[in-house]
Image (cartoon, rainbow, N blue to C red):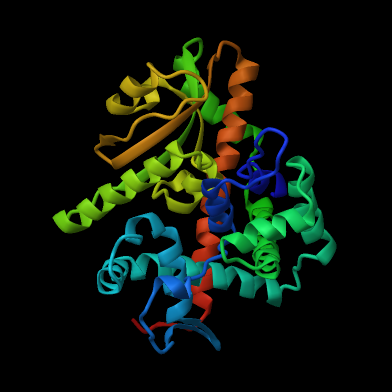
Amino acid sequence: MGAELGRIILREKKTWALSKAALVLLLLLLGLIFINPAESNDIMLDRIVALIDKEVITWSDLYKAMEFELKDKVRDMSNKERLAFLKKYEKEFLEKLIEMKLQLMYAEAAHISISDREIDAAIEDIMRKFSLTKDQLKESLKKEGFLFDEYRKRMGEQLLLQKVGNVIVAEKAIVTDEEIARRANSSKSSTGQIKYKLRLILIAKKADKEEDLQSRNKAEDIYDKLMKGADFREMASKYSDDSSASSGGDLGFVGADEMVRELLTIVEKMNEGSISQLFVSPNGYNIVQLLEKRSIDTDDKLAAEVRAKLIEEKSRQAHRDWVKSLKEKRFIKIIL
């Protein structure tokens, strides 16, 4: 986890520095979100927007999350325009905060925790990988208005969410030889062809024209962030509406006969490691990353591919089912 988060910290030549884009993404991944008082003249009383048993999510929790993640969109807006714009995203962001809170509550009840040593190790891994001292990291955070202690707290929460998710998924994502054989037999017609290892970000189309315009704008904003150096895997986990979001958008190796025409047309022209332009398919607005091309020409390779694919599918479904069960077991009241 620390290595994944650390990738977005950039080092230039012999001097240390966190680029603004890299720091923003790092803080976004950690959920380290604040509203800078200097950027807002509005004084609004805080209030509860959701109850989960006795736990609360406040209006400030919600709007801090939205304002930070949509910062590029709202930067030049007046306070009134910004609040009106953010209001459109309240339900989407509140749902994410509720799901995160539920998982943390489960961890506490199950006595699953992250030690200080694990948090320190993750942070030290980041600093070591990018030749940063603790003081240098603190200073970079401070320049953007963020506190190291809050950064450390959010790092701990993300590590805890990962640990809990792994425990839940490990119990469900078991693949048998029989399952592999059945899937492999149905896929043998595609052996010998070129297969593409892909990651996908999908923003689903909406029936309502105004909502669909918001979806397209969201996809364009994600594409802009990717072009500025954002990590594709993390962006997919955060924003994609596809079922692969829980695995960072990873689709595994996909054959031509498994792709919709719009996707195949794009992928065939891509180089390994590249990111496509935003394109439209029947499912919505898409961005793909081509990780690898290879020919699947042996039964052993096919079986290994099928095993990995089945584990991914079962892991995603197990996580979705688990979060759904958490919601069913708690009293949740939304007060928007």
- In which quarter of the view is residue 145 placed? bottom right
Camera-side residue of 311 and 19: 19
Looking at the image, residue 248 sits to the left or right of residue 215; the answer is right
- The answer to whether residue 333 is above or below residue 80 is below
Residue 142 screen position, x and y as percent: 63, 63
Q: Is residue 230 left or right of residue 123?
A: left
Q: Residue at x 49, y 66 (%)?
A: 324
In this picture, is 239 found above or below 85? above
Residue 150 appears left or right of 113? left
Place of residue 19 in the rendered image (x, y in percent of width and height, measured from the top left): 57, 45
Q: Nearer the viewer, residue 179 or 27?
A: 27
Which of these two is toward me, 90 or 189?
Answer: 90
Give the residue at x 54% y 25%. Answer: 184
For the C terminus, which image quadrant?
bottom left
The residue that appears at 76% across and 47% down in the rendered structure is 132
Residue extending farthest right: 117
Q: Residue at x 65, y 18 (%)?
A: 300
* Residue 119 vertical position relative to residue 15 in the rendered view, above or below: below
In the image, taking residue 121 as reference, residue 94 lies left or right, namely left
Look at the image and tell me whether residue 167 can be seen: no
* 108 over 259 or under it: above or below: below
Toward the front, the furthest residue is: 15
Q: Is residue 227 visible?
A: yes
Where is residue 208, by image quadrant? Answer: bottom left
Q: Residue furthest left?
A: 209
Residue 281 location, quadrant: top left
Residues 30 and 245: in front is: 30
Q: Which x, y percent locates residue 43?
A: 38, 85
* Residue 220 drawn at (x, y percent): 32, 44
- Count numbered badges in the picture: 0
